Image (cartoon, helix red, strand yellow):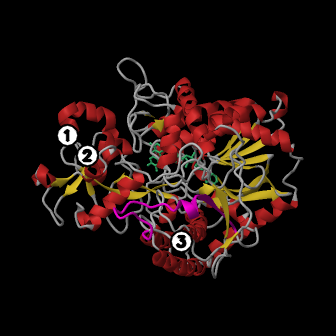
Amino acid sequence: MSTAPQTARRWAESPVPLDGNVPAGPVADLWDRHKFDMKLVNPSNRRRHHVIVVGSGLAGASAAATLGELGYSVSCFCYQDSPRRAHSIAAQGGINAAKNYRNDGDSVYRLFYDTVKGGDYRSREANVYRLAQESVNIIDQCVAQGVPFAREYGGLLDNRSFGGAQVSRTFYARGQTGQQLLLGAYQALARQIGLGQVKMYPRHEMLDLVLVDGQARGIVTRNLVTGEVKSWAADAVLLCTGGYGNVFYLSTNAKGCNTTAIWRAHRRGALLANPCYTQIHPTCIPVAGDYQSKLTLMSESLRNDGRIWVPTKAGDTRSPSQIPEAERDYYLERKYPSFGNLVPRDIASRNAKEVCDEGRGVGPGGRGVYLDFADSINRLGEDTIRERYGNLFDMYERITGEDPYEVPMRIYPAIHYTMGGLWVDYDLMSNIPGLFVLGEANFSDHGANRLGASALMQGLADGYFVIPYTLANHLASVKPPRVSVEDPAFAAAEAAVAERTRRLLSINGSRTVDEFHREVGLMMWEHCGMARNEAGLEKLLDELPSVREEFWRDVKVAGSGEELNQSLEKAGRVADFMELAELLATDALHRRESCGGHFREESQTPEGEALRDDDHYAYVGAWGWGGDLTSEPVTSGPLPTPVLHKERLEFENVHLSQRSYK
Ligand SMILES: Cc1cc2nc3c(=O)[nH]c(=O)nc-3n(C[C@H](O)[C@H](O)[C@H](O)COP(=O)(O)OP(=O)(O)OC[C@H]3O[C@@H](n4cnc5c(N)ncnc54)[C@H](O)[C@@H]3O)c2cc1C
């Protein structure tokens, strides 16, 4: 059991509590009442407001399309060559909604309850309730757009189960749900582009946030094809820039996913909340070698029909078909009979690590467990399994050379999602007025552990159903004065961006960007991955600055700044990852409790389950940059001491208790 909080050595603490601006009242009425209380922008005034949306994944595309449809003048930026290539396209398993089509006991309240509990009581109740309410609208919206969700024989939309729930509420389009949802959102966005309401800027990377009189009033981008650095002014800026899981180098995220947009906003004063809450997904294809650069997810949906097991004896190297039933340990079914293979991700991941640490892991290096479909194939037939998961099975076979219809899959946990992100209030606005943050880029709804199929739900709730109201309220309340790119704040930010580019290109050292990224990622995985302890985190924090210093002394970035230069792009992103890594480790060090994806070895039950410390840590930890608010990189020495701001979490509906899935 953890004792009192440690003395703050590596961080300072703000005495002023942080306010999430949640309206007062019963949680079930909050959002409806708030929608009525918020101010509106008259339809004919909307076109006078220019709004910047950075990101065109599910959160960004849904927001840009909806705001365009409402009549705002929108500019949308992404670094890919097309909005359709946003990382959201990779989402496989499905999207939750409390439709209760199965009549199996689901409701808005149950989705709310499961999500607060699944997040290990570290999320804001009001946000989660709103998310559950809006979940039902998302499905209607997407069906209207033509998203081809799987259907049952009778025509109703089909559902499957995901971890942490005892009902079937996950809507899906085979193993390509993200792709289909993104195509739906993209079509809505393309319509607005065609109408001239949204201007789309692909291959533009946001490299700085511009504040004028303390408000977010624009961004600076670099054109990734020509190298042109340019300023854009607006009445509000929406960051929808995804998660930072690639700070660990190996992850299931697309290679391009990065932290730059939110990190540069943090450097300009935006608070970054709960960075240590990183999700480790239990069902990924195990690492195969030292030079691997990417990990592949096998969707959680597979746990509906696959059974997870390892041999009962350590060091058993027989092939799975030679291991009789009596010598197999279906450890999740044994330890958690109520939820079985569908326990939440944090629990499934930790248990996989535990059996592998005991020497019972399978495959090369013993870092794997079996996900076995033999029973389901016998019961349902191969055709049914093929219909449900065919593309995932094909992908597995292409990567491993093994046929999962014949032999069990081998899986192991990997970094997958980041619950942390920029701090936002109930209106999704950061502490910088006019800066809103949506989707995975914010910290908002998932607490310390996200339940499967709820990231897509959150991104689309934020973009389609929350931001249209809260942005209007902001614009109507603040009535932002006119600002143009002639304001000196833009020139200063442009100069800083140009100087950083020049500096990266001038080092001309001996090590590649990837080498540094891999080194930092391995250090993070080792000391801040599946399990963390004080000694390891202290060591990590002692060592990270010297890698950062070496990067700024010895990195080799080939090419020039006036052309497409992926080495330069990566260098900027890795430099930001290095700074973020230190904050992430500081957050992990300060939180001397286990909760969800953050497992502190000092804080566990006698059975090895995560043990929260609600007396000391029932708060959101939002970090402020400790130095001057410039975007200049820190090239030597430790980062300025970060400042911790605490938002107390109140649980008036789902009462704090030890999570149990037994
Ligand atoms: C393999 C995989 C499978 C998943 N499956 C599921 C699932 O089945 N169900 C579920 O709910 N969740 C799933 N998730 C999680 C989910 O896909 C993501 O959390 C979600 O799609 C994130 O959406 P987003 O719009 O917030 O960000 P993204 O889709 O990552 O989009 C980010 C956008 O921001 C842009 N951008 C970023 N930085 C900049 C910058 N500096 N300048 C300009 N543009 C920038 C990018 O170009 C992109 O357009 C999965 C995740 C992975 C990795």
Residue named by callout 2: 307
Q: Amino acid at mark 2?
A: Arg
**Between disc 1 and disc 2, whose residue precedes?**
2
Question: How many neighbours does mark 2 have within 10 angstroms: few (below 14), some (14-19), or many (20 or more)?
Answer: many
Residue at position x 37%, y 67% in the image: 291
**Residue 603 within the segment the image draws in magenta:** yes
Q: Amino acid at mark 1?
A: Asp
User: Seen from this angle, which residue lies furthest right?
Assistant: 481
Of residues 3 and 337, the one drawn nearer to the viewer in this rendering: 3
Mark 3 secondary-structure assignment: helix
Question: x, y (%) of residue 398?
Answer: 29, 49
Question: How many neighbours does mark 1 have within 10 angstroms: few (below 14), some (14-19), or many (20 or more)?
Answer: few
Question: x, y (%) of residue 166?
Answer: 38, 38
**Between disc 2 and disc 3, whose residue precedes?**
2
Q: Separation of disc 2 and disc 3 at Cα?
A: 35 Å
**Residue 260 within the segment the image draws in magenta:** no
Q: Is residue 275 visible?
A: no
Q: Is residue 168 above or below residue 406?
A: above
Q: Amino acid at mark 3?
A: Leu
Identify the mark at residue 589; answer none if there is no mark: 3
The residue range painted magenta reads 601-625
Residue at position x 77%, y 37% in the image: 472
Question: x, y (%) of residue 461?
Answer: 60, 38
Q: Is residue 622 left or right of residue 509?
A: right
**Between disc 3 and disc 1, whose residue precedes?**
1
Of residues 517 and 513, the one drawn nearer to the viewer in this rendering: 517
Q: Separation of disc 3 and disc 1 at Cα?
A: 43 Å
Of residues 199 and 259, the one drawn nearer to the viewer in this rendering: 259
Mark 2 secondary-structure assignment: strand
